[in-house]
Amino acid sequence: MKFEYNVHMQIIDQTIQNVFQTKQYSLTKLDKGISNHNYLLCVNQKKYIVRSPKSEHSALHLQFEKEKEVLLHVKDLDVETLYFDTINGIKITNYVPHVSEFHETVDPKKYAKAALLLKKLHTKKVEVSFFFDPFFKLEQYKNSIKFPIIHFDQEEKILNVVKEIYIPDTLCHNDVVQGNILFSPQREYLIDWEYGAMNDRRFDIASFFSENQIIDPESRNQFYEAYHLPISNTEVCLFEAMADILWGYWANMLYEKRKELIYKQIATEKMEHYHHFSLHSLSSFIHTL
């Protein structure tokens, strides 16, 4: 592990020297990111953020070339990218001061502002040639798990219903966690497009609700009112249940590979959200199936 870390830091060091043409810089590790390491880089009297994949990142089956292509279409939503190494996955972006993540901000309109970010993405008249297929991803994650630590009641029934209504015709973010929505005094940002691809926009909305544990009706209504596009709450709840299943097994897989407790916590949270909220919200609908 120490050898891997040393190689990792050597690659980052060489990247910084090549990009900025200097050996004079400081690099401070940030307590941010789940699948990646993040650092604050100070060089030439300016600040930047350096993102670098953690070990076992290949288990996520992501391709940085695809992320780079998506970034071309979402410059108006993202923080400006200065450099992107699609071989090693190292990305350098501008540093934005005084930002808060979604869960940190006290902005009373944060649900509406998150909705407007997603609406701006979902109404873009652009397509990419690749897809985020949640059903295929789910099978990849489950097949990688030797020791399941979670379960989801009526999992097959929920997934079959979602498959029947699934329409992957929209460029989506597909990872709308709290750390990927940033608030600054000037504007809001949607960052980290590793999972960006064509998908069903209801997945993004459901992912936002599920990942951020948004169960309060008033908060969800604030989102829907700002999003202001035709959408079925029942269908979003179905996708939300699927998102719980998908990211629950994702976390189970990474806990098994990395032995980091954060993944066990995420897996447990997804299972609890699924049983205590998602299934409960769909109880009357499920009885009709």
Image (cartoon, rainbow, N blue to C red):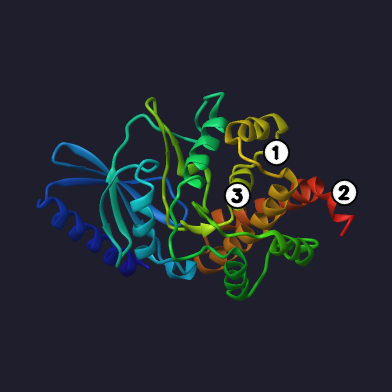
Please tell me how crowded label 3 is: few (under 14), some (14-19), or many (20+) other residues with Cα within 10 Å.
many
Q: In 3D space, how far apart are the residues under numbered discs 1 and 2 (Cα atoms)?
A: 18 Å
Does label 3 or label 2 sit earlier along the sequence? 3
**Quadrant in the rendering for residue 163:** bottom right
Residue 76 at what x, y percent from top left? 36, 41
What residue type is disc 2 on?
Ser
Question: Residue 129's x, y, as percent?
Answer: 44, 65
Q: Position of residue 10 (x, y in %)?
A: 23, 63
The quadrant of the picture occupied by the C terminus is: bottom right
At 57% across and 60% down in the image, what residue appears?
168
For residue 207, the mark is 3
Q: Is 99 above or below relative to 238?
A: above
Identify the amino acid type marked 3.
Ser
Picture disc at residue 75: none
Q: Considering depth in this image, is 85 or 131 the residue closer to the camera?
A: 131
> Does residue 235 sit above or below 90 in this rendering?
above
